[in-house]
Image (cartoon, grey):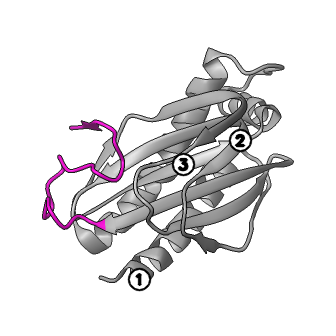
């Protein structure tokens, strides 16, 4: 499979996953924007970023990024509560949403490349910070309008040249894989 073919699978999988998780489970309106490819994962942020790794015959990272007010609304929809500020519950909820969205994507990818592992999500919250995820690979960016806010889903997948299907190779992601 080529990277271009994987990018198509990622785009379709994220669209389906976001519509399912945010639309059906959270009951939020969802508008998926136009996908684009970028050649660098460096991003300046104000808000919440949740990262999760995938590993198998392909390895990569998925990330969800949003402003604090949207993180609070998403957490509120998931937990059926109200949050005015980002706290531990909000960060846990964003991590769980990332796990659901990227976990659903992983299931779609597995149909094409076989079994994959999924890491534990990592969340980052703050003002004026920069995230850089290892390597300089091409990233698929999918903007999503959900719960009256802007959510950015980012995914990078590359062939696992060294691991050949091993669930232990996470050179691109830098996360520990959880095993069932």
Residue that appears at 48% across and 32% down: 122
Describe residue 10's horizontal placement relative to residue 129 as left or right.
left
60 horizontally vs 145: left or right: left
SS category of the residue bearing label 3? strand
**Residue 171 point in image, percent of width and height:** 28, 50
Q: Which mark is residue 63?
A: 3
Instruction: Say left or right for 177 vs 78.
Output: left
Position of the C terminus, as image quadrant, is: top left
**Which numbered mark, 3 or 2, is in the foreground of this view?**
2
Residue at numbered disc 1: 5
Q: Closer to the N terminus: mark 1 or mark 3?
A: 1
- N-terminal of the pair, mark 1 or mark 2, is 1
Q: Which residue is mark 2?
A: 45
Q: Position of residue 113 (x, y in %)?
A: 25, 70
Q: Main secondary structure of the magenta part?
A: loop
Labels 1 and 2 touching (C-beta < 8 A): no
**Mark 1 Cα shell of 10 Å, populated few (<14), some (14-19), many (≥20):** few
User: Is residue 149 among the parts visible in the rendering?
Assistant: yes
Left or right, 48 with respect to 4, comes to: right
Q: CA distance from mark 1 to mark 3?
A: 20 Å
Residue at left offset 61%, top offset 64%: 141
Give me the C-alpha separation between circle 3 and circle 2. 13 Å
Q: Secondary structure at mark 2?
A: strand
How far across and how far down the image is residue 128, in percent?
Answer: 74, 34
Local packing at callout 2 (Cα closer than 10 Å; few below 14, some 14-19, many 20+) is some
Front residue of this view, candidates 122 and 179: 122
* Tag 3 near tag 2, CB within 8 Å: no
Q: Is residue 25 visible?
A: no
């Amino acid at each position: 499979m080529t990277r271009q073919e994987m990018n198509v699978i990622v785009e379709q999988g994220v669209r389906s996953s976001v519509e399912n998780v945010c639309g059906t489970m959270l009951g939020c309106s969802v508008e998926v924007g136009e996908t684009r490819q970028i050649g660098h994962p460096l991003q300046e942020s104000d808000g919440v970023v949740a990262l999760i790794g995938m590993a198998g015959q392909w390895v990569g990272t998925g990330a969800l990024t949003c402003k604090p007010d949207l993180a609070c609304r998403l957490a509120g929809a998931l937990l059926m509560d109200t949050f005015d500020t980002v706290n531990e519950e909000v960060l846990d909820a964003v991590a769980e949403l990332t796990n659901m969205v990227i976990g659903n994507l992983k299931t779609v990818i597995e149909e094409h490349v076989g079994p994959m592992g999924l890491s534990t999500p990592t969340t980052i919250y703050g003002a004026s910070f920069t995230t850089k995820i290892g390597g300089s690979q091409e990233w698929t960016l999918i903007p999503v309008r959900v719960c009256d806010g802007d959510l950015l889903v980012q995914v990078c997948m590359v062939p696992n040249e060294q691991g050949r299907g091993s669930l232990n190779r996470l050179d691109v992601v830098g996360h520990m894989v959880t095993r069932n």
